[in-house]
Amino acid sequence: MATMLVASRKGLFVWEGEGAAWRIAALHFAGEPVTSVLADPRDGHWYAALRLGHFGVKLHRSADRGRSWAEVAAPAFPPKPAEGPMADDTTPWSVDLVWSMAAGGADEPGVLWAGCLPAGLFRSEDRGASWSLNRPLWEEPGRREWFGGGYDHAGIHSIVVDPRDARHVTLGISCGGVWQTRDAGTSWSLTAQGMKADYLPAESADDGNTQDPHALVQCRAQPDALWVQHHCGIYRSTDGGALWQPITAPAPSSFGFAVACDPGNPQRAWFVPAQADVCRIPVDGRMVVLRTDDGGRSFQAFGDGLPQTHAYHLVYRHALDVDATGRVLAMGSTTGGLWVSADAGEHWQELSRDLPPLSTVRFA
């Protein structure tokens, strides 16, 4: 039986099932906005980040698959310096939301990464009991040029840890491009060559430091294969992100937020298109999922089981996931739709249209 963690504006839903039989097994943090979840494959711990407005960001951990939860420390910036090179930094030194979480390597028990808004990267070495800001990235001079996409400030939404070497971490930042470290965060390199931002003046469109990758994923079997759903289209890299190749989906659109990559096949990936930046609904009111099986040379659009008329669903960057087999997918929308597919996205089963807006769907 499979388990899905479905984070929403009004709580964390735990779904259990397989095939055509799925049910809500539990609801945690009812009525509270959950912005990020992590099911750590190394020890089975679950993590849930909450954004409580006046009460700030909170982080909870469960060691028993949600039967009980304990609050742990949330990532937090140190006090902003009153003097020195960071004194005039206009970015707030306070965490507005935890946008992404990732487990460290198999040889790093207890190590976690958290990407936040604004774009601070934090590391924990004790399962979230404490966190430290990665200062080399925060103090990178290029960070001052980053800017927000849908938010006022840039944020880190994608964290990919190389399964071959946990010191190698790749980040997707909106709007700050793609950054990589090969020494566990001691130094960083901008690796967005080939990306193009058509929302900038022509002379700045190729600037890697102001690209807006909406989501970044990695093929676990071949970690040098990376996919990005960018604000301006789809990109793929086969050399670990050194160079990005633009991919054009012929129909209905190359715009969207979500991308999932088959963990065993670097040629296969899924996307959920929307009409355009200025019209974030399915093209012609018909919801489909795009799949490529040949590295982006061709695409198929699948809509069986998805709403095909008057559909206004948008799938955000963390609301599409594929399980370890590469066959089962799950997808949630901003208007409370939740679907699963047991055949690599070719047919979909609707689980609900009545959930709160969904931000994250992850298999546990």
Image (cartoon, rainbow, N blue to C red):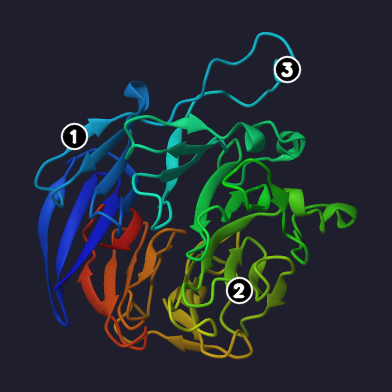
Mark 2, other Cα within 10 Å: few <14 / some 14–19 / many ≥20: many
What SS does tag 3 mark?
A: loop
Image quadrant in which you'd find residue 264: bottom left
Position of 156 relative to 22 (above/below): above
Direction from residue 38 to residue 298 in the image, left or right: right
Image quadrant in which you'd find residue 33: top left
- Which of disc 2 and disc 1 is earlier in sequence? 1
Q: Which residue type carries mark 1?
A: Ala
Disc 3 target residue: 88
Q: Are marks 3 and 2 in contact (CB under 8 Å)?
A: no
Q: Please identify, in this view, whether the residue under mark 3 or under mark 2 is nearer the observer.
A: 3
Q: Which residue type carries mark 2?
A: Ser
Q: Residue at x 26, y 57 (%)?
A: 6
Disc 2 target residue: 254
Q: Which residue type carries mark 3?
A: Asp
Q: x, y percentage for residue 358?
A: 33, 55
Direction from residue 236 to residue 145 in the image, left or right: right
